[in-house]
Amino acid sequence: MKTKNTEYRIPNTEYRDGFTLIEILIFTAIVSVFFVVAAAVSVYSLNIMRTNENRIYATHYADEVDEWLRNEKETTDWTVFSARSAAAPGSNYCMNNNSLGWATNSACLSTDYSLGSEYKRQFNRDIVLANGTDASSNPIINSKVTVSWKGANGNIFSVPIITVFTQTE
Amino acid sequence: MKNDKTLRVTRYTIQERGFTLIEFLVVLGILIFIVPSVFGLIYSLLRQQSRIVALQEVKRQGDLAFNHMKVSIRNSAVTTYTDSAGAIAICTTAADPLIGATSIYFLNAIGSGSYFGYRLSGTDLLYDQTSSPPAQLTNSTVRVSNVVLGCTRTTAAVPPLVNVSFTVTEPTNNASLNYKTLIKIGAH
């Protein structure tokens, strides 16, 4: 009886040439880890790309309003231009209008984010104009333009541009 | 009985070699979800990359044309004209402004009697200079539109103000930036 049993078990072992459950599980685990890491890296990279794209737009919008401020200073009288400013911390303007023009005297709301092209209205553009004097007591206006936007995970990114306007420039 | 049982189990194991239909279906089901997600992710990455490249190109060419105009007009322009030969003067007084044109020319402070100017040709912005071939400020990868060039003057005593505005667009990725400024003629 015992001998017969042994005879039949040997061929059984020889023909078992598939994968065991453990082997499959280890393989699946390795492949899953690879896919998850690859997907995470891709999503992270995508977020960075979006941030870079927005940064290019934001820099342009900041440059645009900085250029417009220079024009305002060139084309209007210094008294009129400096009346737009206030003593530090300065007066705020929310410049979310694409057509560029003096907006109402207030900072952009955190719910606004309406500046941008047709498909990307997601920026806030703030100007702070603070007046003061330079080392020779000549009047100056410090302008700080900040273009900000919300990232995918709720972080707020911003591009600031600081310019000093002088009367005799 | 014990022998019979061992025999049956052994035979069953020997016969089970390939995959069953259910196993194939399960694998197919998993692949149906994984493959589109992977390709979708790769597509998003490539698309985003191409949008950034397009936007950088729009900004590079737009900034180049914009700065070229600002520096040249501010430093070298003396008087304003509507033609490249300097025959029709404009903005000589407050009464003759140039509004909404697509070309404008200036007497060049450097080089006696030479003129330079800017004009829209199709979808490209060109820089013209006396006795030189026109130079392209933007190339065919981007399109320049909404070009508005002009000048105004409040009195004959102050130099003319040149207004420049245009839009640079990359059509494939719909990347677009607007440029607008006023330039005071510096060499007046």
Image: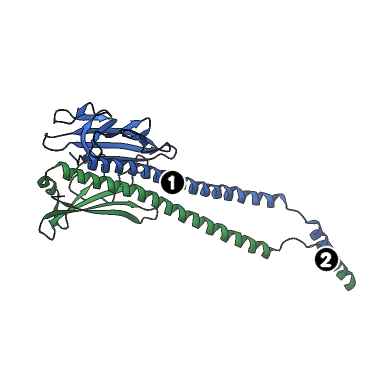
**Looking at the image, residue B51 lies above or below residue A11:** above
Type of amino acid at the residue the image marks with label 2? Thr
Colouring convention used in this rendered image of the protein: by chain
Q: Position of residue A168 (x, y in %)?
A: 13, 50
Q: Position of residue A58 (x, y in %)?
A: 32, 49
**Cβ–Cβ under 8 Å for marks 1 and 2:** no
Judge from the rendering whether residue A49 lies leftward or rightward of residue A132; answer left or right: right
Q: Chain of mark 2?
A: B
Give the structural element (helix, strand or loop) at label 1: helix
Viewer-proximal residue among A20 and B98: B98
The tag earlier along the polypeptide, 1 or 2, is: 2
Q: Please tell me how crowded label 2 is: few (under 14), some (14-19), or many (20+) other residues with Cα within 10 Å.
A: some
The residue beneath circle 2 is B6
Name the residue located 31 percent from the left edge and 46 percent from the top edge: A60
Judge from the rendering whether residue B19 lies leftward or rightward of residue A144; answer left or right: right
Q: Quadrant location of residue B116?
A: top left
Give the structural element (helix, strand or loop) at label 2: helix
Can see residue B113?
yes
Judge from the rendering whether residue A30 lies leftward or rightward of residue A71; answer left or right: right
The residue beneath circle 1 is B53
Give the chain coloured blue: B
Type of amino acid at the residue the image marks with label 1? Val
Q: Please tell me how crowded label 1 is: few (under 14), some (14-19), or many (20+) other residues with Cα within 10 Å.
A: some
Viewer-proximal residue among A167 and B185: B185
Name the residue located 38 percent from the left edge and 42 percent from the top edge: B58
Viewer-proximal residue among B169 and A127: B169
Front tag of 1 and 2: 1
Judge from the rendering whether residue B156 lies leftward or rightward of residue B129; answer left or right: left
Q: Quadrant location of residue B131?
A: top left
Give the chain coloured green: A
